[in-house]
Amino acid sequence: MANQPEDKMARAIFRRGDLHETTPPGKVAVIGCGHVGAAIAYALCIENLCSEVALVDVDEKKLQGELTDLQHAAAWAETCISGDTSLDVTKGSKLCVVTATAPHDEDNLLEKNVAIFKELIPQLVQLCPNCLLLVVTNPVETMTYVAWKLSGLPESRVLGAGTVLDSARFRWGLARRLGVHPSAVRAGVSGAHEDILVFNWCGVHVSGTPLLAVKKDICKEENTFTNEIKQASKDIVSGKGYVSWGVALGVAAICRALLLNTLEILPVATYVKGCRHSSDRSDVFLSMASVLCENGVHSVVKSQLTTNERYAIIDVAKQQLSAQADTGV
């Protein structure tokens, strides 16, 4: 009996060591170690979603700083951390998360990001021919289209972070007004991240109850409320200089669904053959509620929409087709 506390401690240590056996197999590459890329790498580590995270950045000093900082956390995380300025470190990755971007304060951001992708994506796919591509670079719907065109991969295996963050903000804002935890709110935003958001009000549920049955007059605040959501990134940037934690955890949620084959539904940027509410059947990438699995996007959910929301989605599709044409890809 005197040895019982020690035995319990030993069992606790062994249980922690045994976590290595349950770590999901496979490597995730994070290309771009700016504020967002580094936060995503951190989120992947603390959630134990893969056996290895491989970091890539052209800035060797920045890369080494982030790499060393994460490696020092190895005593508390179960994930191996590697990194290099060369894409070779990504070889064999199961999932490639692309955050690489030109500085946001530069002119012609889209043109410069397309140029980066023209050099990056073909090399990445050559090194990781069986990977899933998850694009975080903005404008995310347009850059997801560019990645798909340059990669030659099936459309289901190329997706973007889309409106996952916008939807999280929508849920948080509703929860704050209702006085409940955000986890009790099920709500989604479609369209294009930050730019052309379509809020699906009739699909909002609070613990399984339609929102309008809980708070009938909430739609009177719709314009004020949605403007707050659209303004959120600017307010955060004004305060801390950049956005990182919200998008990182949103991307980690997408990674979890892909790596663990959970069939979770999340509003990602995905391939849509035109729009089911329109006669236009052109290839376009929009943020839509989608079922995610180990092979990428399994299917797009046919959400219940109001007439105004249907027309708004059609408008987003038209604007996205124009933006895609501007890339020249």
Image (spheres, rainbow, N blue to C red):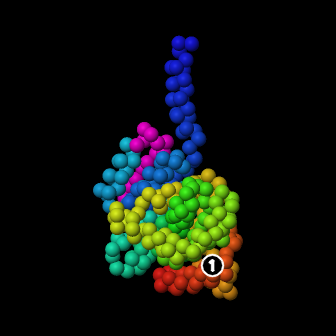
Q: Which of 304 and 67 is in front in this view?
A: 304
In this view, the residue farthest toward the top is: 2
Where in the figure is residue 242, as x and y percent of width and height?
Answer: 37, 64
Query: Magenta segment range?
Result: 73-88
Which residue in the protein does label 1 denote? Answer: 309
Write the residue at 66% across / 71% down. Answer: 202
Write the residue at 63% across / 81% down. Answer: 308
Please name the amino acid that badge 1 sits on.
Glu
Q: Nearer the viewer, residue 279 or 133?
A: 279
The answer to which quarter of the image holds residue 60 is: bottom left
Above/below status of 328 relative to 42: below
Write the residue at 36% across / 47% down. Answer: 69
Where in the figure is residue 272, as x and y percent of width and height?
Answer: 63, 76
Mark 1: few/some/many CA within 10 Å (<14, 14-19, 20+): some
Inspect the magenta stretch and tell me whether residue 144 lies in it: no
Q: What element carries label 1?
A: helix
The answer to which quarter of the image holds residue 18 is: top right
Where in the figure is residue 240, as x and y percent of width and height?
Answer: 34, 62
Write the residue at 39% across / 47% down. Answer: 70
Q: Can residue 222 be seen in this view?
A: yes
Above/below status of 196 relative to 213: below
Where in the figure is residue 262, as x and y percent of width and height?
Answer: 65, 54
Q: Which of 185 and 316 is in front in this view?
A: 185
Inspect the magenta stretch and tell me whether residue 86 lies in it: yes
Side of 244 where 141 appears, left or right: right
